[in-house]
Image: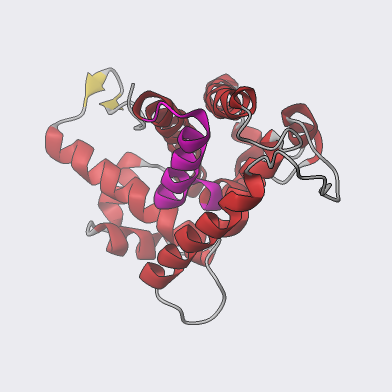
Amino acid sequence: MTGDIPAVDGDRPLRADARRNRDQILGAARDVFVEHGANAPLELIAKRAGTGIATLYRRFPDRAALMRAVVLQAWRRTEEIATSAADEEPDPFRALIHYMHSALDIRVAAVVPALLAEIAELDDVEMQTARGRAAQRVQALIDGAHRSGALRPDVTFADIGLLVVRLSRPLPGSMSRELNDELAHRHLQLLVHGLRAEPDGDVKIQGPALSLEELNRSGPLAPPR
């Protein structure tokens, strides 16, 4: 599989140049929505993508369609990077951390919370399926790290997911994108120690240990019901 939305126009596959334009628009939209919110000007997205606004509207007829495509791609990319992490890293704990670093790189955890509330009415079967597949892959990484004994037994799906969300959000002020990204990876490395199980550790973590189901019912990553 790939992390891209199927590159078709109606029933016809997109040409290579059209697919490239589409991917550029989706990447630019993801970054602009993260940086400026769901109401960011579409003209800014087109400019960031290096295309004209007319090209954007040919691919995505309105803002809702663009936001839906960005979120759908984010779920599919999440499944993809979680699968790659498991395939490329034989150590289960390292595979989980590999996934978390990859999630920071593609900014999936920053764009999804920013847009889910805006596209709740478009949360159809395709979206639910993509979200469910992504969650299953991430949960499998967490389960593997637990079975290995390296991940603290009280670390949950929500702990991992919300840590990535917090680290993915741009810091306030005029800090550059590059420095923001570097600091996010640094802070994740600092947090890794807290995720590891200590043989003689007896420190209990305060606060709710949310399961995936509890997060889906009440967490910020779930669309409003």
Q: Is residue 221 left or right of residue 106?
A: right
Structure colour scheme: secondary structure
Q: Residue 102: say if magenta.
A: yes
Please tell me whether residue 155 is drawn above or below residue 192 in the rendered image: above
* Near-viewer residue (158 or 132): 158
Q: Residue 181: say if magenta.
A: no
Q: Is residue 170 left or right of residue 59?
A: right
| Residue at image coords 37%, 24% | 87
* Residue 184, x across and y down, in percent: 49, 61
* Near-viewer residue (100 or 125): 100
Looking at the figure, which quarter contains the C terminus?
Answer: top right
* Residue 139, x across and y down, in percent: 61, 26
Q: Is residue 168 visible?
A: no
Please tell me whether residue 50 is drawn above or below residue 68 in the rendered image: below
Q: Is residue 225 left or right of residue 169?
A: right
Magenta range:
89-110
* Near-viewer residue (114 or 64): 114
* Near-viewer residue (172 or 51): 172
| Residue at image coords 46%, 38% | 99
